[in-house]
Amino acid sequence: MQRIATFRKGGVHPSDRKALSSSCAIEQLPMPVELIVPLSQHLGAPATALKQKGDTVEIGEKIGKASGFISADIHSPATGTIKEVRKVTLANSVACDAYVITVDNDAEPKQWEYHPFRALDAQEILAIVQDMGVVGTGGATFPTHVKLMVPKGKSVDALVVNGVECEPYLTADHRLMLEKTEHILDGIMIVAQATKPKKIIIGVENNKPDAIQALRAAINMADYPITVEPLKVKYPQGDEKQLLKATIGREIPSGKLPIDVGAVVLNVGTAYAIFEAVVLRKPLIDRVVTVSGEAISTPKNLRVPIGTKVFDLLSFCNGTSRQPEKMISGGPMMGFAFFDDQTPVTKGTSGVLALDHQKEHDAPTTACISCGRCVAVCPMGLQPTKLNKLIEHARYEDAMKLNLMDCKECGCCAYTCPAHLPLVHAMKIGKKMGRK
Amino acid sequence: MDILNAFLIIGALGLLLGLGLAYAAKKFAVKKDEKAEDILAILPGANCGGCGFPGCSGYAAALSAGTAPNGLCPPGGAPVAAKVAKILGIEAEETAERMVAFVHCRGNHELSQLDYKYDGIEDCNAAALLFKGDNTCKYGCLHLGSCIKVCPTDAISRDEKGNIMVNPALCIGCKKCTLVCPTKVIRMIPARGSHAIACNSNDPGGKVRKICQVGCIGCKICENKFPESGCKVVNFLSEIDYANPMTQIVQAAKACPTKCIVEAK
């Protein structure tokens, strides 16, 4: 029997609940009447506003300029006028300025022209990717041009493309791999042109055999030097650290980046965005979002303009069938609970979930009995139980000494805790207070 | 004879070792700062950190070395400052007046609106990670009691309505609660102040009206009708100038439409 690649340390097996939406083809959401486009949709400094209240904007026009090295441009997802510039709070509690754009529905749809990409060199590709405001669409929204910039003296041994999608419920990447297979592969080849890796691997969790098959068939057709690696179904297989361990057997040291071990990791959604940016010169102005959860009437995978309000997404999916217990932006393990249906979709929103009343959720928290289950499942090899106690007693410095900063808030500890302790919440507050 | 030898040997040994010890005691003596010791004996010993030094001994050492001004000890106040001045041989200056903490919010889950149901860790800073807390008003008290946990004298408690209150009689002015509070709704007021503004919101009046029944709407009745009340509205929020004699504050409190000028006792 062939061994399926995976990471070794920790991990959990949450029920994946992907069947709700995995067979729903991606649908285009009709352009909403109003969009809210935040200026901070990426990791790093918020973009600087280029437009003001009352200005008209064209679809694809640059409306926010990157304001630092780690920052990204923002483009208008629609043709229309800027109604106002307002402060908004995004689902991840980031407060920033946002354009409220009234969409002009009579505007002619823009035709994106095809540009050949084979002759472009690394600098040109980076410039286009930067100009089109591409960021990682997996959730961390790291500006892609920074990621693709290989520092001097370092070389890329492996380009690892992340098609794992290990978060329960989410099927956006899965559908993208099935429906836009060739485009994703072209996007990967563009990245390969820019970073010159020795090998290219696409990691896909083994619960998506159709995606693995589709990718392999397309690779054979196009004769690309790409291998598809089926990975064991285990959360958090799709985290870049775990993915690198599983695919190329390398571990990223604490506080380092994938490039330090000679790897570039990229989401399939980002590869698709790169394809659109380089080949169609289309900025990142829309993305695929999974709208799912037990409380959603008709779960769907939707292609939506950035800035669409969650309200519009829900109404297109026939609303909620019952009062949801919790609304989550992203996946249930690492996503952010939010309450306002006027919250906009950003470049990093992979899903919008309306979860039903959960029994587990209602269970009262009890005292930690030091059973050590959280230690066993922590993929980073931390001791959540000890960290939690230190944070509870405000001993943030001691927690930092136990590598609290390596915690990536994947949620394995809280998921497995028999006392239902909010461990990730504790880690988050520990990090915040510890940084002070 | 043998018995005498034993006496002599032990006696000589004792003398020798005794001299050695006496010499060591002089030679390796740890110099004690007697002034600091005396000051430490006078300081209240709460180790609250209100002076900005690590505990009472830290402040005592700094006083003795002359690197810290007298009168920084909030729990000790004027009497302690006078005694310290005597030891240091300086004039007891005008000490800073006694300040106490005050929670500038009387909103609670009945009177003010909530954005969502918070069921995370019982800690204000933990709640503040999520949209700056569950209150729709982002300036108000989160009622999770992080200040209660850090108060060294148990001066802060929750009343029957769920509001967090500071007992000014017990407050020693160490400011620990003001540092831990994520919304900065706890600020220091002079202990002699009879009234305080029970609101911290800089939101415009219309918005405050919608989300809280007891918030300051910045109507300026206190400032315009009762100029001697000491109230002044800045950024839609009334503030009391405690340097003012505040002769009309009781009338102003009565006239306040949202009753957010409250007694500070």
Image (cartoon, coloured by chain):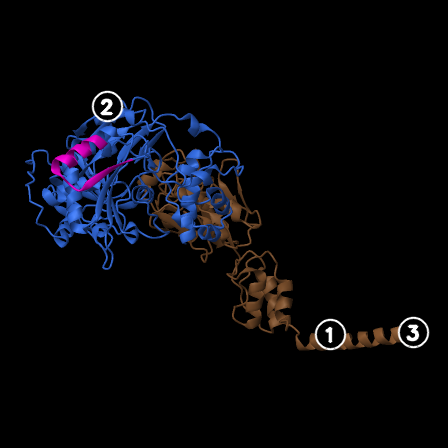
Chain colours: A blue, B brown
- What chain is tagged by disc 1? B
Q: Position of residue B17 (x, y in %)?
A: 76, 74
Type of the residue with mark 2 = Asn
Residue A69 visible in the current orientation:
yes
Which amino acid, mark 1? Leu
Label count reads: 3
Q: Residue tagged by mark 1?
A: B21
Q: Which residue is mark 2?
A: A318
Side of A339 where B80 appears, left or right: right
| Magenta region | A212-230
Q: Which mark is residue B186?
A: none
> Dividing the picture into quarters, in which one does residue B28 lie?
bottom right
Looking at the image, which residue is at 46% across and 55% down? B242
Residue B176 placement, left or right of A132: right
Q: What amino acid does circle 3 point to?
A: Asp
Q: Secondary structure at mark 2?
A: loop
Q: Nearer the viewer, mark 2 or mark 1?
A: 1
Q: Are marks 2 and 3 on the same chain?
A: no
Residue hosting label 3? B2
Q: CA distance from mark 2 to mark 3?
A: 112 Å
Residue A124 x/y as whole percent: 12, 52
